[in-house]
Amino acid sequence: MSAEGVASPRLFDCRDAFTGTLEAVAEEDLRIVIVVNDSIGSSKLSGFRKRWPDRTINVGIAEQNMVGVGSGLANGGKIPFVSAASCFLTGRALEQIKADVAYTNANVKLVGQSPGVGYGELGPTHHSIEDFAWLRVLPNLAIVSPADPWETSEAVKAAALRDGPVFLRVSRFGVPQLPRRSDAVFAIGKAETLRDGGDVAIIANGVMVARALAAAESLDEKGIGVRVINMASIAPLDLEAIRAAADLGAIVTVEEHSIRGGLGGAVAEVVAGYRPCPVRIVGFPEFMPTGGIEFLFETYGLTPRGIARAAEEAIALRGKP
Amino acid sequence: MTSSPWKSTGSDRTAIVTKIRDKARAIRMHSLNMVYAARLGHPGGDLSATDILATLYFGVMRFDPKAPHDPGRDRLVLSKGHASGALYATLAEAGFFPVDWLSTYMKPKSLLNGHPNRNYVPGVEANTGPLGHGLPIAVGIAIASQIDHAGYRVFVITGDGELQEGSNWEAAMAAGHRKLDNLALIIDRNTLQQGARVAETNDVEPLGDKFRAFGWEVVDIDGHDPSALIDALTWPGGRAKPLCVIAHTIKGKGVSYMEDQVSWHHGVPTKAQLDQAMKELSLT
């Protein structure tokens, strides 16, 4: 996947990058297996199953067992990618993720599919806007929310190579390939500055990064300098990037997640202990009404316009004594 | 490691049973001394599981205590992680770590936490504690063994009250469906849970029928009889099913005042009670 040139208008489903790269690494590393909860189709893993039926473990609709089995496979020397809708994987099996994966420090890769409001009209039972909050308190567990196909692909490779547990948040919502230098490097725990400016920092991850860039461009036209940071890793956090953002004096965070306990909370925790400044957190505040993904993004300000508005509010707050 | 543990041990059975009984006595004594020194622990469950653990480690399983991560080792997952005292004593007696570690049980910064951690303690396979976690983990290990045609076996010990946790039945269904013939579940069927009798709380019977309905081979045995445990757990090939051993046990086994008493789920003996327990155990 090319990482060079300007943003293409074409939109990508990051699940394709996930499965394509997973198959490529699984060809090389025979320890890789997949564990699913009848989620072959929604995880786009039918190609993997066809190639490696004996490395495909479908436990049926049983998430607690799914994560426990993943931990056991790691005990047996396998590298399991446990892939399921993020709402069920993280909510239903949270104690297994805590004890069997994070506390055990098991070499298990959890893949939360269609997170955030990816299931739109299916409603809050199927939304996964809590997963950052309840996973990022777990030591040992790396948490990565890629922004585009290139980063998804790099994150899959990094997860496979990392000796320890990882949670990957893979979105189905169409995103553009972000503009990057051809020598761009992805590393778990390392933030990526996509654009620099001196008035405010917008820190985003996942599908919100492209929108943060669009917001920055509109602010630029008003003469406001914006730094856009792609913070794909919520754990471990890139503390240096957050402290440097705090030095600008105004921060906006944007995530397809609850406004409580996610990326915004993580950033605010660091800023409060370093150099307090306004941190406006853009995300979802409640169980949401019926509506499609775009409707929900629009309603709660997860749009270039809403993000730009939050940035101006943060700058205004900084100005007060 | 020995090469063929699948067959019953045959002519030297008497010697092996004697060794298991000696080890079981030592494990019980260690466990009670640990609980007494820590002023904490779960002595009732330690004592009910002791003969199962001793038989596994001294009569059934293949392992090398000097190579605890040997990929081909047999694994034991103690799902009832609160019986950590008995597990640690067993692993120490088996040579995974020095016996003198046991005196640190639950002391500040000890490797021997109240519930086992595989990153701290050689020989521990799973970080158990919350109930209903061990069987799914054991199913995953058994699948890994089958994928690799590695031939190692997985043993998992659960309590009986623990089977009230639904995750066990998710795993039981998966094990039956996948015909995991390298997996053995041993239920420490002491009929008591933390607060009362299992039967009075949320009965698990008919236990054997439940597992048979999920596609398992089921045997009922005396869980304090090493010879019966060896017979159940060293099976010839060709079964093509996971094995459920319902090991009928007595909570607090070996100490008269603890036996079948719900109050000894947790409970710390006085010095006089400890002395009495040691005296009774020395006569077994």
Image (spheres, coloured by chain):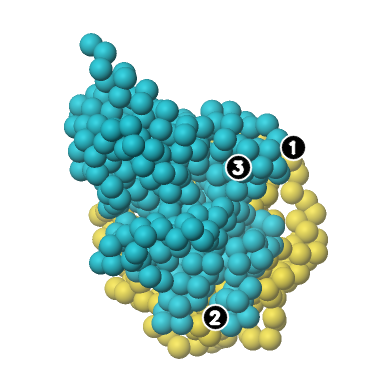
The residue identified by callout 2 is B147
- Looking at the image, which is closer to me, B65 or A198? A198
Q: Chain of mark 2?
A: B
Colour of chain B as rendered:
yellow
Q: Give percent across and percent down for residue B34.
A: 36, 45
Distance CA(mark 1)–CA(mark 2)? 42 Å
Q: Give percent across and percent down for residue A162.
A: 34, 64
Q: Which mark is residue B200?
A: 1
Q: Which mark is residue A294?
A: 3
Q: Does B142 appear above or below A210?
A: below
Q: Does A318 appear above or below A208?
A: above
Mark 3: secondary structure: helix
Q: Which mark is residue A85?
A: none
Nearest-to-viewer mark from 1 and 2:
2
Q: Quick check: B161 left or right of A229?
A: right
Label 3 with label 2: CB-CB less than 8 Å = no
Disc on the earlier residue, 1 or 2:
2
Which residue is pictured at 58% across the width and 28% down the height? A286
Q: Chain of mark 1?
A: B
